[in-house]
Every structure is written in C-alpha cells, then in structure tokens.
C-alpha cells in the first residue's frame, strides 16, 4: 500500500524558503528515498510566504530529470500561496521543455 510522506517546508527552510543546500538535503534525504520506496511525497508549504526559483529547482528538478515528468503524479504540493505556486509552476514548466538546441529529437546546426 502506498504511503504518503509529508515534508514541512516551513520546518525545514523557514518562512522564506531560499537555501539551496537545504533544498538539496531534502531532495537527497527525504524526497528521493520516499519515492524510491514507492511512497507519495507531500511537500507542505504551510506558513511559507515565499520561495526562490533556485530553491524549488534544487528541490525537484533533479527528481524530474532522473525519474521523468510522471514522477509529479507521486508528488503533491500542499498549502501553496499564489507566490509559491507560481514559482513551482515555472520550475515544472522549465523541466518539461526540451533543451534549446534540440528540435524534434535532432540537434540543430550551430
């Protein structure tokens, strides 16, 4: 049976989630192990007023890169205010775009 593992971003990173080292530690020590065990990860942003794009990137981009975009079906972003939601959406959209030098799976001539 799939379990949910909830991670309080406020408890780990404070009201303004900006420290990339904290995000990396969360990714390596909590998010990836939970996903590897088949669990759903709940990233709870309750009481987080803002975050940086670099924090969210460090938190989830490598997860998406290594496990594929479908991993987002196993990750829930909870209690996000509009600012936090917008930053998460930017990072997720960025991770789904092909690199600028790739077109239809073929490398463009430089």
Image (tube, helix red, strand yellow):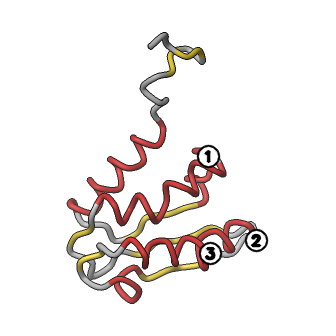
Report the residue marked by disc 3: 4
Kind of element beneath mark 3? strand
Kind of element beneath mark 2? loop
Quarter holding the N terminus is bottom right
Mark 2 vs mark 1, CA separation in Å = 16 Å
Q: Are marks 2 and 1 in contact (CB under 8 Å)?
A: no
Kind of element beneath mark 1? helix
Report the residue marked by disc 1: 70
Sequence-wise, which precedes: disc 3 or disc 2? 3
Q: Where is residue 94 in the image (x, y as percent from the top left)?
A: 40, 41
The vertical placement of 24 against 15, above or below, is above
Q: Toward which corner of the image does residue 52 lie, by quadrant?
A: bottom left
Mark 1 vs mark 3, CA separation in Å = 17 Å
Label disc, if present, on residue 37 of the rendered structure: 2
* 46 sits left or right of 62 in the view: left
- Which residue lies at the image location 58% right of the left edge and 48% below the top edge? 65
Q: Toward which corner of the image does residue 21 lie, by quadrant?
A: bottom left
């Amino acid at each position: 049976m799939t379990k949910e593992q909830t991670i309080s971003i406020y408890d780990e990173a404070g009201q303004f989630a900006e420290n990339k080292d904290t995000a990396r530690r969360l990714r390596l020590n909590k998010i990836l192990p939970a996903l590897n065990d088949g669990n759903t990860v709940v990233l709870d942003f309750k009481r987080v007023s803002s975050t940086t794009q670099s924090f969210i990137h460090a938190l989830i981009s490598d997860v998406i890169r290594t496990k594929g975009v479908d991993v987002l079906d196993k990750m829930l972003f909870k209690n996000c205010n509009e600012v936090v939601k917008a930053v998460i959406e930017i990072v997720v959209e960025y991770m789904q775009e092909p690199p600028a030098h790739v077109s239809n799976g073929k490398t463009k001539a430089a």
